[in-house]
Image (spheres, rainbow, N blue to C red):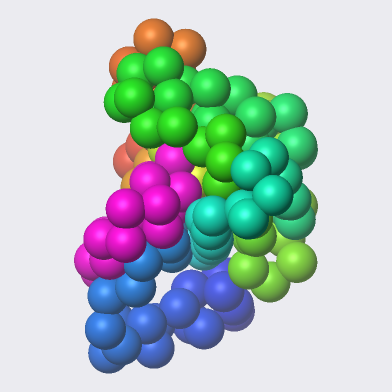
Amino acid sequence: MNDPLALLLSNRLDMEDKEGSAISLVLQGLRAITVEIQALVTSNIQGIGKRTVSGIAFSRLQLMMGILQKRLCLYFGKQDVYINVVGDIKLEKGKGSVFNLAVGVASVSSFVCIPIRSDTAFVGEVGLLGELCAVPYLEKRIQ
């Protein structure tokens, strides 16, 4: 089986759309795999939000929170933000792992309580100016 996670996610098409869950397509070596990025954004009663990540670098989440705050005027300072890559997969910069668009979309979805379509994948890198950057090997990712 080339992509076992895709098989697990195939049931998702029969499920309702969910807030805070975004699908991305990343390259590991020469093959594309499907990953699910989950985000949970909640108010912190103490007034100072914390950040927790599993599967991505903490600095990647901090960077995305800064971009969202500056470019979309979404303030995450008093919010706890939890990011999880389903399946205990570790995503690293490079190696075709262009996934921060999915992290941003999942985070905003959870923050504003708007579900993400279950049949949509997000492949892209978000630049510091909020722009979408070109994605290498896009054709390979969607085959």
Please tell me whether residue 14 is drawn above or below residue 76 in the rendered image. below
Q: Is residue 113 magenta?
A: yes
Q: Quadrant of the N terminus?
A: bottom right
| Quarter of the figure with residue 126 | top left
Residue 123 seen in render: yes
- Kindly indicate the quadrant of the structure image that contains residue 85: bottom right
Q: Is residue 76 above or below residue 117?
A: above
Task: Say left or right for 114 vs 23.
Answer: left
Residue that appears at 62% across and 53% down? 44
Q: Which residues make up the magenta segment?
A: 104-120
Q: Residue at x 27, y 90 (%)?
A: 14
Seen at 45% across and 32% down, the residue is 75
Depth order, front residue of 72/95: 72
**95 sits to left or right of 38:** right
The outermost residue toward the top is 129
Magenta span includes 108:
yes
Which residue is more in the foreground, 43 or 111?
A: 43
Query: Which quadrant is the C terminus positioned in?
Result: bottom left
Judge from the rendering whether residue 7 lies leftward or rightward of residue 117; answer left or right.
Answer: right
Q: Locate residue 57: give its quadrant.
A: top right
Q: Nearer the viewer, residue 4 or 9?
A: 9
Is residue 66 toward the left or the right of residue 105 in the image? right
Q: Position of residue 83 (x, y in %)?
A: 63, 54
